[in-house]
């Protein structure tokens, strides 16, 4: 084990941190941590290494707190940090492109050594249901494809993403258990409570041998308890971030149970009941992580019964050798950097029936915990604390953290209540909450993420105070948007971590669903062209010159489709393929483009097309051009629900290789060569 700084095991004394955790929960008051340049105070955010019995003690304390507040003490709680499964709404955000070619993200379509690999999700047909599949296709010199082989995957799992490792000899497929496949009721110990699990409970890792003109052959299968939050591949090491809520319903602790009743109900609770397990090739369950490799958050106020695990798996080993670390406590968001994972947790308890209507206590604070990938090891490095909370929108929380050159930038909100939702639908009755950008840096010696600087963000316009909705981090810059789509985008200069500033405003209203930084100081905005009534009339594209952030200007504009047209770029995990060619940058992304009904020659039956929308930006000339679409399917009036489900745009992916574009869609890979 490698724990840095002050993390030391202390044996023979009661876990004093339990009293601290309970006090923090009841009072709702957070502590401070030392700012950069000032005297260091005790690091209250720092995680504590567990000793034997600490996990059981931690969960007992949380269960007692839940019961005292009127909740079922041992319910299977929905994790406070969501997963990348079909059921999850919160995902990890990667920010700017990762540094170094050795670091990869998962995808549904990958090109490697003259081969193309596709991961196809299940879909309904007139004859029944087509199962999920993993396919291998050979790429010819002209860009055309030929089938080499395919493997049918377990229909009870939803494919999430794949990696190609081992110099193109191995492929790892990640899938999440379908929450609605063979879902069985869970009955509590006294048979008085029956619940249905509301989210997936298992992750699958399938390892295949692959190669040039070779059909995939399965080598290993690993099934892991929990939800997938994020992943990375560095060399041949696969890193998985998962979260798990143990099934404790056999230890019946009803709402309002007394302290003595809680203790009696939990007298047989042990560590094995809390820790997630894994099975290799259907074998006996093994613990995913050892208690000695877990850490606890002393001031965590979450009521979730939750463990977050970070696991390193050697894909080149014959037995999928692995090591894991574990974080016990409710997690609000996870950010994956190139070689680090940051886990955010709240110091205060939220008041409200759901996230959107939550009211935060005054003086709320958010703790951030850093773990680092080091070969086969995952090490806990440091923790820090920032003022405020991550807001009211679960989908946005991960995107409010971003790592750049060893600094972590965090956007938080300091108001007790605020706006939430996807614009233009917002909680208008709430006042705009002030926001705060904090820069943290790993000191490298004392397990501390120290505050380098703070920048208050309270956008004001002629309409009054505005609340930040999204923030797009782009290396030394960031672009903040508000809920009012017509308002400017605020440009933040983060080049000096000790002195971040608001550098200017960019008139990019309606273009800011997604913003893509490009070479030469250019910025591509993708959004919606809306009428005054708020109806989206098409996909709006704009190219901006932001070399001088105080005088940003629009260079070019374009438009895709008419009313109802959508892309995957306004989702919480944007799907975008970028190809850099000297002074040209080509972009491709899944889109559903509806024709304007009055267009000349429009067929009444043909409404539009779905496939890969393609753009080309000339970074030298500052021009933007639309390229022909790589069509996967026409959109017709009278299309069946089965057809819509088969060509679900959220399951589509675009990929560019040389002069060809490929669109994974509806169980196939479609090809478009040239313009």
Image: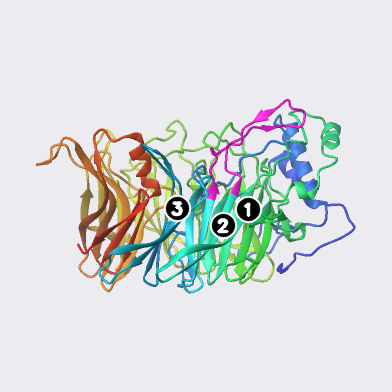
Q: Residue furthest left?
A: 600
Quadrant in the picture for residue 230: bottom right
Q: Counting residues from the N terminus, which is met first, the one under dot 1 or under dot 2? A: 2
Q: Label 1 belongs to which residue?
A: 224
- Element assignment for label 2: strand
Magenta range: 176-202
Image spot of residue 605 (x, y percent): 19, 36
Nearer to us: label 2 or label 3:
3
Observer-nearest of 134 and 6: 134
Image spot of residue 673 (x, y percent): 23, 63
Image spot of residue 123 (x, y percent): 41, 43
51 to 421, vertically: above or below: below
- Element assignment for label 3: strand
Is residue 411 shown left or right of residue 226? left
Q: Residue 205 carries which label?
A: 2
Observer-nearest of 411 and 396: 396
Q: Is-magenta flag for residue 499?
A: no
Q: Residue 133 carries which label?
A: 3
Q: How far apart are marks 1 and 3 (CA)?
A: 20 Å
Observer-nearest of 374 and 476: 374
Number of numbered discs on residues: 3
Residue at screen point 56% across, 35% down: 358
- Element assignment for label 1: strand
Nearer to us: label 1 or label 3:
3
Badge 2: few (under 14), some or many (20 or more) residues near its Cα, within 10 Å?
some
Q: Distance between the residues labelled 1 and 2?
A: 8 Å
Q: Looking at the rendering, in which quadrant would you find the N terminus?
A: bottom right
Disc 1 + disc 2, Cβ < 8 Å: yes
């Amino acid at each position: 084990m490698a724990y840095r700084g002050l993390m030391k095991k202390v044996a023979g004394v009661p876990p004093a941190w339990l009293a601290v955790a309970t006090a923090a929960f009841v009072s709702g008051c957070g502590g401070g941590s030392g700012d950069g340049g000032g005297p260091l105070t005790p690091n209250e955010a720092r995680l504590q290494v567990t000793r034997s019995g600490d996990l059981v003690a931690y969960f007992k304390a949380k269960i007692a707190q839940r019961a005292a507040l009127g909740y079922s003490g041992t319910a299977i709680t929905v994790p406070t940090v969501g997963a990348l499964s079909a059921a999850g709404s919160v995902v990890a955000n990667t920010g700017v492109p990762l540094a170094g070619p050795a670091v990869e993200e998962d995808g549904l379509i990958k090109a490697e050594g003259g081969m193309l690999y596709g991961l196809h999700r299940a879909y309904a047909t007139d004859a029944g249901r087509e199962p999920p599949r993993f396919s291998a296709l050979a790429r010819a010199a002209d860009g055309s494809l030929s089938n080499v082989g395919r493997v049918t995957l377990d229909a009870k799992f939803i494919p999430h993403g794949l990696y190609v490792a081992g110099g193109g000899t191995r492929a790892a497929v990640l899938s999440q258990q379908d929450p609605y496949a063979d879902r069985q009721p869970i009955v509590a110990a006294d048979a008085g409570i029956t619940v249905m699990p509301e989210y997936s409970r298992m992750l699958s890792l399938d390892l295949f041998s692959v190669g040039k003109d070779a059909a995939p052959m399965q080598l290993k299968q690993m099934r892991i308890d929990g939800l997938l939050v994020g992943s990375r591949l560095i060399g041949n090491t696969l890193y998985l971030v998962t979260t798990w809520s143990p099934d404790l319903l056999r230890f019946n602790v009803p709402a309002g149970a007394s302290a003595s009743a809680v203790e009696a109900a939990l007298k047989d609770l042990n560590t094995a009941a809390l820790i997630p397990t894994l099975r290799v090739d259907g074998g006996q369950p093994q613990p995913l992580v050892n208690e000695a490799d877990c850490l606890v958050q002393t001031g965590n106020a979450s009521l979730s019964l939750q463990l977050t695990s970070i696991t390193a798996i050697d894909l080149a080993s014959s037995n999928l050798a692995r090591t894991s670390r574990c974080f016990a406590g409710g997690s609000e968001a996870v950010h994956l950097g190139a070689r680090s994972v940051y886990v955010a947790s709240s110091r205060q308890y939220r008041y409200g029936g759901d996230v959107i209507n939550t009211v935060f206590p005054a003086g709320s604070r958010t703790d951030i915990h850093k773990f680092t990938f080091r070969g086969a090891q995952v090490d806990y490095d440091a923790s820090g604390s920032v003022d405020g909370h991550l807001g009211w929108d679960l989908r946005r929380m991960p995107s409010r953290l971003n790592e750049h050159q060893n600094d972590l930038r965090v956007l938080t909100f300091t108001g007790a209540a605020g706006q939430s939702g996807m614009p233009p639908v917002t909680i208008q009755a709430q006042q705009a909450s002030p926001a705060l950008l904090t820069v943290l840096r790993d000191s490298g010696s004392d397990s501390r993420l120290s505050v380098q600087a703070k920048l208050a963000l309270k956008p004001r316009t002629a309409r009054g105070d505005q609340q930040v909705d999204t923030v797009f981090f782009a290396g030394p810059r960031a672009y903040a948007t508000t809920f009012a789509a017509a308002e400017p985008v605020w440009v933040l200069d983060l080049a000096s971590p000790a002195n971040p500033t608001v550098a200017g405003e960019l008139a990019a209203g309606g273009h800011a669903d997604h913003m893509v930084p490009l070479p030469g100081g250019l910025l591509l905005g993708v959004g919606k062209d809306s009428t005054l009534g708020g109806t989206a009339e098409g996909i709006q594209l704009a190219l901006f010159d932001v070399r001088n952030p105080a005088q940003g200007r629009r260079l070019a504009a374009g438009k895709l489709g008419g009313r109802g047209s959508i892309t995957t770029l306004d989702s919480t995990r944007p799907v975008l393929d970028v190809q850099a060619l000297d002074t040209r940058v080509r972009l491709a992304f899944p889109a559903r483009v509806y024709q304007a009904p009055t267009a000349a020659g429009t067929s009444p039956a043909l409404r539009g097309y779905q496939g890969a929308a393609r753009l080309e930006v000339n970074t030298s000339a500052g021009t933007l051009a639309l390229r022909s679409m790589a069509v996967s399917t026409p959109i017709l009036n009278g299309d069946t629900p089965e057809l819509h489900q088969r060509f679900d745009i959220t399951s589509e992916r675009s990929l560019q290789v040389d002069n060809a574009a490929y669109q994974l869609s509806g169980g196939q890979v479609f090809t478009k060569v040239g313009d």
